[in-house]
Amino acid sequence: MLTDQLTRATRQLAESLALPPREARLEAQVLFAHALGVNRAWLIGHDRDTLTPEQTAAIETLLKRRLAGEPVAYLLGEREFYGRPFRVTPDVLIPRPDTELLVELALERLPQDAHLNVLDIGVGSGVVAISLALERPRCRVTGVDLSAGALRVARANAETLGADVEFLAGDVFDALGGRRFHLIVSNPPYIAAADPHLTRGDLRFEPPQALASGGDGLDLIRRLVSEAPAHLEAGGWLLLEHGWDQAAAVRALLAEAGFGEPFSGRDLAGHERVSGAAFPS
């Protein structure tokens, strides 16, 4: 019966991935629903059904991959961000709730009726650029990424969600010439290259070039801070996501580069996860 298979899968997930029972149950339901092409409510209403061999095989294929540690988002091919579904593949980072703070702080600096130029460096799946474009449709939003695979995913997400975003291939500011922006945002790689977390959990399956940046994780942030002034309008803002323990270092980099009064915003857990400042005219 379906309920017996769900119970067995829940136990396997809890034991193999050290998940709390409730989280393991939820993952099992999500995987079963995806494999069967139904929703979780259907599973509850059909818990005494007997599955066909084909249905069981589809479930077992997904479950085996998850037990090997593959992230649920990659198995489903989708993750919600800022209330919208985004396609994700192993070419891009899995969108995380922490990054919604970057969007919220950016929106605070983009008046509803403003026609401003916005740049997202390291666009990945496009969640930040697309969210900003949809929330502020009068702004001109540009997204840049070095990865052709990431740009394919971002363009597909923009088309699906109806977002008007210009996507460019390039390394940081290299593809932009002398263009300037009123707001530059980035969720860059910020993990130290030797950090043991890179070999654990979901991070093992995510693109390494989007995760690590030098010995202290700040190499790309240093480049962004030093090069951004040449691409900011007078009084334009630079907002950067970073690690939970890097806020003071990022604020110091901003101050040294001539930005005025750097600040840091806290996520729902109370950690300083986004820092930024305006560049004086």
Image: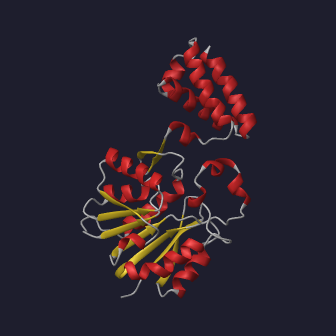
Which residue occupies 64% across, 36% down?
66
Which residue occupies 52% across, 50% down?
91
- The quadrant of the rendering that contains the N terminus is top right
Give 107 or 216, whichever is nearer the viewer: 216
Left or right: 67 with respect to 178? right
- The quadrant of the rendering that contains the C terminus is bottom left
Left or right: 7 with respect to 109? right
Residue 278 visible in the picture:
no
Which residue occupies 54% across, 87% down?
256
The correct choice, above or below, for 142 with respect to 256 in the image is: above
The correct choice, above or below, for 106 with respect to 258 in the image is: above
Report the label total.
Answer: 0
Its colouring scheme is secondary structure
Spot occupied by residue 49 in the image (x, y as percentages of width and height):
56, 12
Spot occupied by residue 205 in the image (x, y as percentages of width and height):
62, 48
User: In which image quadrant can residue 214 be found?
Assistant: bottom right
Residue 98 visible in the picture:
yes
Spot occupied by residue 232 in the image (x, y as percentages of width and height):
37, 79
Which residue occupies 69% across, 23% down?
8
Left or right: 109 with respect to 49? left
The correct choice, above or below, for 269 with respect to 84 in the image is: below
Spot occupied by residue 11 in the image (x, y as percentages of width and height):
72, 29
